Amino acid sequence: MAKINILDSGIYNKIAAGEVVERPASIVKELVENSIDAGANKIEIEIENGGLTSITVTDNGCGIEKDSVETAFLNHATSKITHEKDLESIHTLGFRGEALASIAAVTKLEITTKTVDDDFGTKLTIEGGKRLSKTEIGSPVGTRIKVDDLFFNTPARKKFLKKSAGETAEITNLLQRLALANPKIAFRYTANGNTILNSQGAGLESAIYAVYGKDTLSNCKKINWFYKDIEVSGYVGNRNYTKPNRTYQTVMVNGRYVSNNTVCMAAQRAFERYLTTRSYPFFVLNINIPFEKVDVNVHPNKMEVKFEDPQSVFYSVYIPIKEMLNEVDEAAVPVIKDVSVQLKIGDGAAVKQVDNKPGIVANESAGGQKTLPTTEDKELFKSLAACKKPFQSVNYGDFGVAAPEMSLVQNDYSSNNPDTSAHGALDLDESVKVGVAFDTYVILQKNDDLYFIDQHAAHEMLLYDRFMEEYGEKKNIKQQLLVPFAFTVKQDEAVFINENLEKINECGFSIEEFGENSFKITEVPLMFSDIDFRHFVNGLIEEPSDLRSNDVKYIKEKLARAACKAAVKGGDKLTDGDIEYLKKHLDKSSALRCPHGRPVMVKITRYEIEKWFKRVV
């Protein structure tokens, strides 16, 4: 048997640090939570180079007594629990006594702290877990901790970190959640000298405004619900205010920001009938529950919790959200109008304009008939029609619609039955239309084969192919919008857009800054004139993990996927000319999959059908 070694403290402290200090955001979380536990109502966070170079957290909390400063950096030293029974009802954010020791083990750390009873503050310097100096110094009441050169003594850990922008985004996302979880604390956060977050500590509404911008609260409703001994309070977006990812969902338990599937699933279930693919409800919810009925001692980073009665928590979230969505009050749940009108432009081509979307939009009512504008819209449409030539007409055969979602992978797809294999020369011009099923699937017959075409997937594929072709040949002509589309995003999403503005504009989209975390779209590729801009923006930022990439090819493909959502949808009525357009262009496509990998066409042979009816064996 191998010899058993007792590890040196320098080694096991570095190992322990791996559980607590995963990245710069982990350090920020631990230090800020210590400030909150110290009773601070004002906390300032400064980082350089994504926290890799330095992290500074300053608070006006109670401070640490001068005789206890060094003790605070010993393993399992904490002021937050004393007896074993304290673990049954944890009221503070921190309690393990691991954070400061772990942080000090892998950084160069300097702490300055003072209590109200001390005449002078105490300054302690630690490097790699070893004390270098301790002096008295003049300072205000509170604590300032500066952490430099993360993982300077464990360089192998650095290679697993993201680039500066990625680590900054992680810290930004964390601090936004902490500001929402502690709305009565003023947070000021700067990165590389730029102010990213400035929450005034004036309550939850003020915190939501600071994090998400001015338009969010007008699209949300406040809830306050009691179920058994559980209280749920906060804000939930209305049925139209959905988001492209879960980073817009914030859950707090007794004021602690956590990640919990029970709460998120309850909200998702309540919204179920109103959600489309890849859309998620917006909410900021705090769940107050007796401390003894929730276990926060699940993981070293304290992000996960377990409930004694998860079913009660589920219903305490599900019921109030469901009731809110079922309310008849139209003012609380605004519905977007969809008004179409014919505008005659240029050579007399008819282009449909919708009042809630800039640019050219081809929408039709559920019955396939164009609806007329209301009285209050007539003046607007009259002024639009008076323009000499507000837009150029789009020549896509009989389609007056927009673009497909983008397929990044074009493989030789195949399956057993039904047939979706690579088609070679289909020559669908020789096929005849049998009909259209459910206003979604075009049915063609050619000889002894039937072809079922998903009109949305097919149009997505064709528009994607066209976009990629025009981009490759630098032929993507821009279409200026009569009314620019303005939108506001979160800080990490704004960083992603700002870093890639040049690449975005190269693809034919003109996006400009329009205030703090706000942008406006002024031009789009001509083929995307019918785009739904809200869906386009959501598609651009739908995957939080993708916000770190700035590869040119990736940006091009992401733009195409987002823009191609303007393709005809299932339920849209196609004319015979539209179907001929599909037949003609499907023959030229190299693969029969939409940009998301769904089949565009399914072939069923006469032999297979006759087997269904036992005509053949």
Image (tube, rainbow, N blue to C red):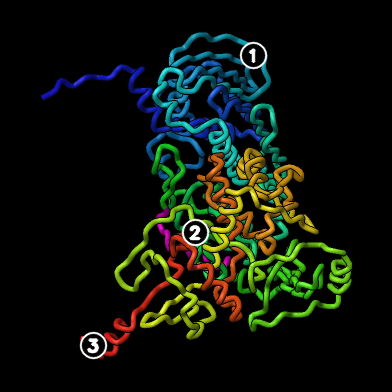
Looking at the rendered structure, the kind of residue marked 3 is Val
**Tag 3 and tag 1, C-beta contact below 8 Å:** no
264 horizontally vs 533: left or right: left
Task: Return the residue at label 1.
Answer: 120
Label 3 sits on a secondary structure element that is: loop
The residues tagged by marks 1 and 2 sit, at their Cα atoms, a distance apart of 65 Å
Q: Which residues are magenta?
A: 307-321
The residues tagged by marks 3 and 1 sit, at their Cα atoms, a distance apart of 97 Å
Label 1 sits on a secondary structure element that is: loop
Residue 519: horizontal and vertical position, in percent?
72, 47
Q: Quadrant of residue 400?
A: bottom right
What residue is shown at x 40% (from left), y 73% (from top)? 602
**Quick one: 179 or 25, which is closer to the camera?**
25
Task: Return the residue at label 2.
Answer: 595
Looking at the rendered structure, the kind of residue marked 2 is Pro
Task: Return the residue at label 3.
Answer: 616
Query: Please, is residue 410 above or below residue 179 in the view?
Result: below
Instruction: Kindly tell me whether residue 251 is visible in this rendering.
Output: no
**Quick one: 34 or 538, which is closer to the camera?**
538
Disc 3 versus disc 1: nearer the observer: 3
Q: Earlier in the sequence, mark 3 or mark 1?
A: 1
Disc 1 versus disc 2: nearer the observer: 2
Magenta region includes residue 405 = no
Q: Count neighbours of disc 2 (C-alpha within 10 A) and say few if under 14, some if 14 to 19, many if 20 or more.
A: many
Q: Earlier in the sequence, mark 1 or mark 2?
A: 1
What residue is shown at x 52% (from left), y 8% (from top)? 133
Q: Count neighbours of disc 3 (C-alpha within 10 A) and say few if under 14, some if 14 to 19, many if 20 or more.
A: few
Looking at the rendered structure, the kind of residue marked 1 is Phe
Residue 552: horizontal and vertical position, in percent?
56, 41
Residue 254: horizontal and vertical position, in percent?
53, 48
Number of numbered discs: 3
Residue 31: horizontal and vertical position, in percent?
54, 30
